[in-house]
Structure formats: structure tokens, C-alpha cells
Image: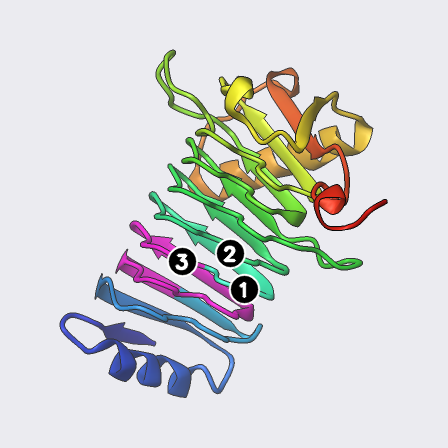
């Protein structure tokens, strides 16, 4: 089932998508020019193919659907996403995956500022963000759970894989970064840790999935090139507010 977005107003386009998504099907939307809120709240029986630029806050509260974007995405993508899969064949803007609670998000290229801010996890719901290139400042800010992976692919030798202040306020979850970072400017609440067997198995699967989604050659990527960052404490600001 195909739709042509073109100059269609975002609310009208989303109404068309939600009407079609009432039954299990694959929907392709072409000529998307930044219309926002696409795919918000969609459940697990829908596959949505987007050709163009995905607009702000698309895939928010998504609950099991799959969205594949053949282009770039703007800001606030996957806001409070609960479940599902989002694959972006391009770059993504700021605050991607804000308060993400489940599902997985793969970006072929770069991501903007504050990706993964306030991510969280509960029992078997462990959200995952994979960024192929580099991430902007404040990656994983106040992160409470989940996994963030930065592959650092295609960077110049002077590029940093993650920007300044990554992990600021982080009190849960893990980040795996391949490439140069400015540890002197990272969040004081985190520390570098060696990879264990569980980390290595996780990263092997991430690389396999990334290669499958984007047709990328990751054969030269070594697990030894990754550094794991974790919080030093689950209550980094506890002493600021209580006496113990």
C-alpha cells in the first residue's frame, strides 16, 4: 500500500497512515518532506517504509511497529518509544530516543545532541540505540538504562566518536564507544570499564544487525576497539539531597 506525502499536512497524512494501519500490512510513504509525528503509537503489526525526511517527534510512543527510513530524520525521533524497530538510512537530529523504554533504533550515519537522554529499562525491556558514525554532545545524559553503541565508522582521524559531556548524570545502562573521545570532558558520573563476555556477544550481534540493515562492511571492526562506559553509582546526586 503506497501513499504520496508531498505537501500533505502532517495531521492529514498521519490520519491516512493510522487508517491503513488498523489491519496488518506494509505501508510505503513516498515524498516525505519533514511531516512530523509519523508512526506515533503504531503497534506491532505494521511495517512502515518512509522515503524522504522523517519529521520531528516521529515514532514517539511507538509500540511494536517497524519503521524504515530511506533518508534522514529530524529531532525528537522515538520519543518515549516503548517497543519496535526504527532503521534510518541517513543521519538523525537532536534528542533522539528521549526516555526510550524499549525497542531498537539503528542510524547509519550521525546523530545530534542529547541522544538517549533519560533512556530507561525494566526487566526484559532493554532499549538499544546504535549510531554508525558519531554522536553530538551530551550523549546518554541522565541515562537510567538501556544500551547505546557508537560505531565510529567513516570518521576522520581527528574526529571524536562522541561529543563533550557524554554520560553526564548517567546512573544506569551501558555505552559502548568505538573511536576517540574527550574523557576529560565526559560526565564525572561514569568510568571506562573492560568488556566482559556478555558485552562481546552483544556487540557481535549489533555489528551483524548493522551490516544486515545497511549492507555495510564491518569486517575490519574489532571488539578491542570499543570502550564500555558505565555509571560509578546508581545515585550520583544522592549526597546533594540527603544526608547519607
Residue under the image location 52 percent in, 51 percent down: 105
Depicted 166 relative to depicted 4: above or below: above
Depicted 215 relative to depicted 118: above or below: above
Question: In the figure, residue 91 lies in which quadrant?
Answer: top left
In this rendering, position of residue 226 left or right of residue 114: right
The segment highlighted magenta reads 49-77
Give residue 119's position: percent from left, percent from top. Answer: 60, 53
Q: Which mark is residue 80?
A: 1
Depicted 122 relative to depicted 6: above or below: above
Residue under the image location 45 percent in, 81 percent down: 21
User: 68 or 130: which is nearer to us?
Assistant: 130
Give residue 200's position: percent from left, percent from top. Answer: 73, 28
User: 126 or 141: which is nearer to us?
Assistant: 141
Whole-number angstrom distance, CA of label 3 to CA of label 1: 9 Å
Which residue is labeled 3 in the image? 76
Helix, strand, or loop for circle 3? loop
Q: Residue furthest front?
A: 243
Q: Which mark is residue 98?
A: 2
Say few, some or many: other residues with alpha carbon within 10 Å of mark 1 (under 14 / 14 to 19 / 20 or more): many
User: 224 or 117: which is nearer to us?
Assistant: 117
Q: Earlier in the sequence, mark 2 or mark 1?
A: 1
Question: In the figure, residue 208 lies in which quadrant?
Answer: top right
User: 205 or 100: which is nearer to us?
Assistant: 100
Residue under the image location 41 percent in, 40 percent down: 108
In this rendering, position of residue 116 left or right of residue 224: left
Is residue 200 shown in magenta?
Answer: no
In this rendering, position of residue 129 left or right of residue 134: right
Check contact, mark 2 vs mark 1: CB within 8 A.
Answer: yes
Amino acid at each position: 500500500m503506497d501513499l504520496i506525502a508531498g505537501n500533505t499536512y502532517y495531521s492529514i497524512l498521519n490520519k491516512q497512515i493510522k487508517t491503513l494501519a488498523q489491519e496488518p500490512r506494509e505501508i510505503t510513504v513516498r515524498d516525505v518532506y519533514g511531516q512530523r509525528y509519523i508512526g506515533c503509537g503504531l503497534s506491532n503489526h505494521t511495517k512502515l517504509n518512509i522515503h524522504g525526511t522523517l519529521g520531528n517527534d516521529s515514532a514517539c510512543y511507538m509500540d511494536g511497529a517497524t519503521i524504515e527510513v530511506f533518508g534522514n530524520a529530524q529531532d525528537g525521533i522515538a520519543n518515549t518509544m516503548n517497543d519496535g524497530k526504527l532503521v534510518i538510512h541517513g543521519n538523525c537530529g537532536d534528542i533522539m530516543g528521549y526516555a526510550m523504554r524499549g525497542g531498537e533504533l539503528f542510524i547509519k550515519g550521525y546523530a545530534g545532541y542529547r541522544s538517549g537522554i533519560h533512556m530507561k529499562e525494566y526487566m526484559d525491556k532493554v532499549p538499544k540505540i546504535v549510531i554508525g558514525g558519531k554522536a553530538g554532545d551530551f550523549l546518554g545524559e541522565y541515562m537510567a538504562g538501556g544500551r547505546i553503541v557508537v560505531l565510529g565508522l567513516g570518521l576522520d582521524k581527528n574526529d571524536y566518536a562522541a561529543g563533550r559531556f557524554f554520560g553526564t548524570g548517567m546512573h544506569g545502562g551501558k555505552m559502548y564507544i568505538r573511536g576517540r573521545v574527550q574523557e576529560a570532558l565526559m560526565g564525572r558520573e561514569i568510568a571506562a570499564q573492560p568488556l566482559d563476555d556478555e558485552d562481546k556477544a552483544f556487540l557481535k550481534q549489533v555489528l551483524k544487525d548493522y551490516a544486515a540493515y545497511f549492507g555495510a562492511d564491518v569486517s575490519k571492526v574489532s571488539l578491542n576497539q570499543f570502550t564500555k562506559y558505565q555509571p560509578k553509582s546508581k545515585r550520583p546526586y544522592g549526597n546533594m539531597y540527603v544526608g547519607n
